Image (cartoon, helix red, strand yellow):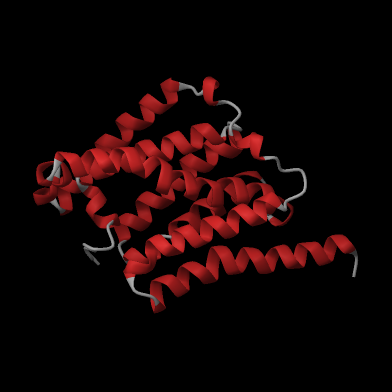
Amino acid sequence: MRPAERRNRWLWVEFLCLFLAAPVVLAVFLPPSTLLPALFGATLVGMVLLHRTPGFHWRDLVRGWSQIDWRVVAAFAIAMTVVSVGLLMAVLPERWLVVYRMSPWVWLAIMMLYPLFSALPQEIVYRALFFRRYGPILPPARAALILNAAVFSLAHLLFWNWIVAMMTFAGGLVFAWAYEVRGSFPLAAVLHAVAGNIMFTVGIGALFYTGTIVRPF
């Protein structure tokens, strides 16, 4: 077997374990309380694998912060707000601004911590690691973006909710586009942070909270 073929086989093993088996095991066999430890563990594994990826440099992830197209961010924020409010009013109207009404300080803490401790780690694993390390085995162009959105949606399987699946797939497409098509990890991370903060502000983020899982199936 040629070295390239052997490497690609090993990449497939890693890919299937990290992006398929791990989310299914977490969703089916482990309690929801393991979400944060699982995210932390996946981030550590992802960072190690990314560090070992030929041609990758950590400075690649910090390039372009000053070149973020804030018009794209603003347009996305508006669209995200409209979608989030619409879904909330359709399925969970009683959750309107629930976190802020419960405690403005908790809301503020989420706004500050979510970008750093949730959005950023997920972007490292599901965008940088996905496209940089597993590029040799990915399908071409648009198919790779769709696959990325699919595995990102699968990562949220533990919520067992069709709204979560739909939103994370759509969000995954946007974040993958920002990283792979626009070539900007900072843009992907900012868009992800904006999406999460809007959802938790509006109230639809309750569907993403493992202590209050709502199942509208």
Residue at 30% across, 62% down:
161
In the displayed structure image, the side of residue 47 where residue 114 appears, left or right: left
Q: Position of residue 70 (x, y in %)?
A: 43, 22
Query: Is 140 situated above or below 24?
Result: above
Q: Is residue 185 visible?
A: yes
Q: Position of residue 184 (x, y in %)?
A: 57, 32
Judge whether 5 appears above or below 184 on screen.
below
Q: Residue at x 36, y 50 (%)?
A: 167
Q: Residue at x 77, y 62 (%)?
A: 8
Work out which quarter of the rendered image holds the C terminus and state it. bottom left
Instruction: List x then y, in percent, for residue 197.
Output: 30, 39
Left or right: residue 132 compared with residue 158: right
Query: Residue most toward the right?
Result: 2
Is residue 60 placed above or below 72 in the rendered structure?
below
Residue 184 vs residue 47, the one in the foreground: 47
Q: Quadrant of the N terminus?
A: bottom right
Q: In this rendering, does residue 139 appear at all? A: no
> Looking at the image, which residue is at 39% across and 39% down?
193
The answer to whether residue 14 is left or right of residue 18 is: right
